[in-house]
Image (cartoon, rainbow, N blue to C red):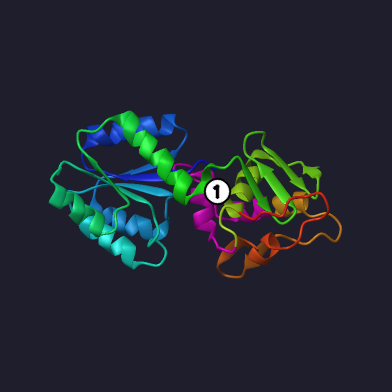
Amino acid sequence: MAPRITVVEDEEALSILLRYNLEAEGYAVDTIARGDEADLRLKEQVPDLLLLDWMLPGLSGVELCRRLRARPETERLPIIMLTARGEESERVRGLSTGADDYVVKPFSTPELMARVRAMLRRVKPERISSQLVAGDIDLDRETHRVRRAGRELKLGPTEFKLLEFLMQSPGRVFSREQLLDGVWGRDIYVDERTVDVHVGRLRKAVNRGRQRDPIRTVRGAGYALDETFTAAPARAGVRTETV
């Protein structure tokens, strides 16, 4: 899955420009125009990086940043703040609220893209790595191949995305709705039970004989990649790094 970036910016022309350039870099992008709406949306789904405007209707970017840092699920969310305030005191204020970086408008788009790439490499290396490894399962994003204990698995496109999504966050339980948003996208309507069907297909492809099932079902909550599976020793000749 491409790293997901949320842009909170009320200036429509700039929001469109940012979306265009970020998508051209291969990122999945959500855009939000109001601070209060962003506050609600970020409680539902946490992106890999946030581009946050200082001045927003409904709730300021500074206050939103403070709230995000106060929540356990977003306390380490990478945040780049965008603002027309270039004074040193304002930059210090922005960084002191919890922003990781500060970009003054008008800014160079190539420079901003470089900052986004650098921050993702530093804080989310697993989101841009070409390979994910968990236990004896090895997923290659570039070749779209998955191997378990050296044996290549035959996965459909959706099963590949589903496994990739789960491998990025071992142990985290995702609801069906979160999986629909993360794998299928917000703009596509799919019934939640479709998730169960594809999880079943993924399990059938991944598990052979007495091999341990890496996918954990949490009744009433959703699915997760079992974090104890990621730490299990791999078979001989297979790497044991975990994501």
Q: Compared to 49, does 226 lie above or below?
A: below
Task: Examine the image and state in which quarter residue 51 appears.
Answer: top left
Task: Examine the image and state in which quarter residue 104 appears.
Answer: top left
Who is closer to the viewer here, 190 or 132?
132
- Mark 1: give few (<14), some (14-19) or many (20+) Cα within 10 Å: some
Please give the range of residues in magenta.
171-199
Q: Is residue 123 left or right of residue 243?
A: left
Q: Is residue 28 left or right of residue 241?
A: left
**As drawn, which residue projects farthest toward the front?**
88
As for residue 177 lying within the magenta part, the answer is yes
- Taking the spot 73% from the left edge, 54% from the top edge, the residue there is 203
Who is closer to the viewer here, 106 or 175?
106
Q: Quadrant of the C terminus?
A: bottom right
**As drawn, which residue projects farthest toward the right?**
209
As for residue 119 lying within the magenta part, the answer is no
Q: Quadrant of the N terminus?
A: top right
Q: Position of residue 113 (x, y in %)?
A: 37, 34
Q: Is residue 21 left or right of residue 181?
A: left
Q: Position of residue 118 (x, y in %)?
A: 42, 41
**Element under disc 1:** helix
On the question of residue 212 being in view, the answer is yes
- Taking the spot 31% from the left edge, 30% from the top edge, the residue there is 109
The mark total stands at: 1
- Residue that label 1 marks: 126
Who is closer to the viewer here, 119 or 217?
119
Who is closer to the viewer here, 4 or 195?
4
On the question of residue 186 being in view, the answer is no
Q: Position of residue 29 (x, y in %)?
A: 40, 40
Question: Which residue type does callout 1 highlight?
Answer: Glu
Q: Position of residue 15 (x, y in %)?
A: 28, 36
- Taking the spot 37% from the left edge, 30% from the top edge, the residue there is 21
- Taking the spot 42% from the left edge, 33% from the top edge, the residue there is 23
